[in-house]
Image: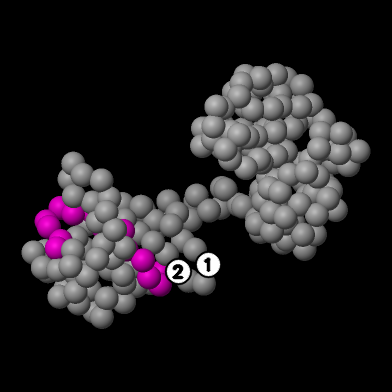
Amino acid sequence: MARNARSAKSFRVVVLGLGRFGESLARELVLRGTEVLAIDSDPALVQKYSDDLTHTAVADTTDADALRQLDVPGFRRAVVGIGTDLEASILTTAVLVDFEIQHIWAKAVSRQHGRILERIGAHHVVLPEHDMGERVAHLVTGRMLDYIEFEDDFAMVKTVAPEDSVGMPLCDSTLRTRHGITVVGVKRPGEDFTHATPDTVLHRGDVLIVSGRIEEVESFANRV
């Protein structure tokens, strides 16, 4: 099994279920230097990804004894990547809750599925298809370059600098008072993103990272 040279410097994560979501997540974690134990009941899937992930194992993720043998209770972070098999998703999450794992992420295929996972103790519920569909809908219907929505009616968008703010520092542009948004990052063509400060002067063609309430950031991006 492949081992990432940086894994000893990072925390460990157990990923249960190697479907498209679980496999993609596990690979990304390994690339980021995280030690990953990936578990699936399908030997073919485990064999397929064994060379790319830190550790892999074939086991029934709903079997507490099998997971104990793999030292799953010793992990502080766990991700349940099982989606279509609702019973396995729910039972696996329940086992992790019984293990008192501190941070449990669980994939859900519907809001009802997500509510069940939350009720049995999942700390974070992810709806990949729903979240991506919602994000793309905002991009398709607006002028944003990218869109990320958070809780409590808050979002961040990537958009271009408006003409009426070009050539002046942000503190003089009154963007916050006029639009209720905050510019948190600026990217010039050919340069990296930098943190925005009150003295940052916007240029034509600058790409901005803007935060604020959903309605206000959408309105600002569409105006641009």
Q: Mark 1 points at which residue?
A: 151
- Residue type, label 1: Glu
Marks 2/1 in contact by CB < 8 Å: the verdict is yes
Q: Quadrant of residue 9?
A: top right
Is 6 on the left-hand or right-hand side of 13? left
Query: In the image as oriented, which residue stretches furthest toward the left?
Result: 167
How far apart are the alpha carbons under marks 2 and 1?
6 Å
Name the residue at the bottom extreme: 177
Q: Can residue 24 be seen in this view?
A: no
Please give left or right for residue 134 compared with residue 103 in the image: left
Q: Is residue 71 visible?
A: yes
* For residue 147, above or below residue 51: below
Q: Quadrant of residue 4?
A: top right
Q: Which of 42 and 75 is in front in this view?
A: 75
Describe the element under mark 1 as helix, strand or loop. Answer: loop
Q: In this view, does 207 lie to the left or right of 158?
A: left
Residue 102 lies within the magenta run: no
SS at badge 2: strand
Density class for disc 1 (Cα within 10 Å; few <14, some 14-19, many ≥20) is few
In the rendered image, residue 61, in percent from the top left (x then y), is placed at 81, 38
Q: Which amino acid does label 2 sit on?
A: Phe
Q: Position of residue 35 (x, y in %)?
A: 63, 35
Q: What residue sits right under mark 2 in the picture?
A: 154
Pinpoint residue 138: horizontal percent, then vertical percent: 40, 57
**Magenta span covers which residues?**
201-214
